[in-house]
Amino acid sequence: MKKIISFILSIILCSSIFASSFQEIMPLEKNTSYNFEENLTNFELENKSLVTQDKGKESFIKTRIEDLGIKRIASDGKVYAGNETVPYSGKFALFLGDITEYTETYVDGILNGPKTWYSHNGIIILEENYINNKVEGEQKAYHENGNIKSIVNYKNGKIIGIEAFAKNGSLLHKSDLSKGTGIWKYFWENGNILEEGNYKNWKKDGKWIKYRENGKVDVTTIYKNGKLIEQIWS
């Protein structure tokens, strides 16, 4: 049981922290730019267009990919490419040799659109979407075999729901939260519920039940505002 719960926690941490922990590989001070490697290349993809949403208006921008090394955050809080004076629209990518670590999309200097992380062999391992510099909607992480590892739902930059899956696709965890309140469920790999309960204001509240793998109740715990009140073993 401990191994399964630890696995779920690692999935949640990876999906919600992975991107932010690597948001900037090097600190970018205002009005400064950095080059990660001298041999990193900058390039443009021409004759293509990217459709994106900006404050409800559909705008078509030329698809442009630049190395993250020339990314510059100015005093206005917007992102620029190198010494350009117009806020950047297009994609920045972090290249490590021939490997693309991730790409992120900007519109008028603001992080708006998809951000995608890749493994060293080029397989997508995390996909998320940004609106006005905040994660919004579904953030999907993937196992090495391509199956979904977790789906974390964001609204206004906050987590409102989580689903976690084993490599074989079986559901391990599901939660539906709004302002820290909702039902949490953990599952055995055979599909049976491992544990279920309710959160209220981000704290365990009410009855939480743990089950054995065969579906029989193992222990029932009563919480009030995050504090353990009573525990009954079956």
Image: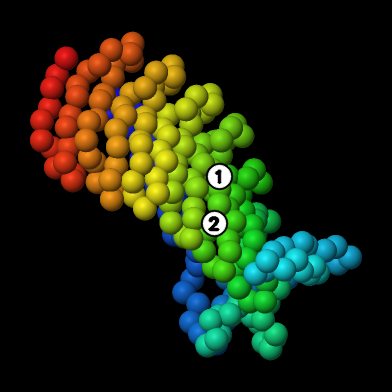
Against 197, is 19 above or below? below
Viewer-nearest of labels 1 and 2?
2
Looking at the image, which residue is at 58% across and 64% down? 131
Res. 102 in view: no
Which amino acid, mark 2?
A: Glu
Disc sitting over residue 114 in the figure: none
| Res 189 quadrant in image | top left
Verify CB contact (< 8 Å) between mark 1 and mark 2.
Answer: no
- Residue 111: name its quadrant: bottom right
Q: Taking the image as drawn, is residue 74 in sight?
A: yes
Residue 8 picture location, percent across and down: 38, 36
Residue under the point 53% across and 24% down: 168
Distance of mark 1 from mark 2, alpha carbons? 12 Å
User: 193 or 16, which is in the foreground?
Assistant: 193
Instruction: Give the colour scheme of this rendering.
Output: rainbow
- Residue wearing tag 1: 140
Check disc 1: other Cα within 10 Å, few if <14, some if 14-19, many if 20+: many
Residue 94, how many percent across, how many down?
A: 61, 63
Mark 2 Cα shell of 10 Å, populated few (<14), some (14-19), many (≥20): many
What quarter of the picture does the C terminus occupy? top left
Q: Is residue 146 above or below residue 216?
A: below
Residue occupied by mark 2: 136
Q: Position of residue 67 (x, y in %)?
A: 66, 69
Q: Residue at x 43, y 51 (%)?
A: 159
The local secondary structure at tag 2 comes to loop
Amino acid type of the residue tagged 1 in the rendering: Lys
Q: Is residue 197 left or right of residue 173?
A: left
**Residue 197 x, y percent position in the rendering:** 29, 33
Hey, which residue is sitting farthest left in the picture? 229
Element under label 1?
strand
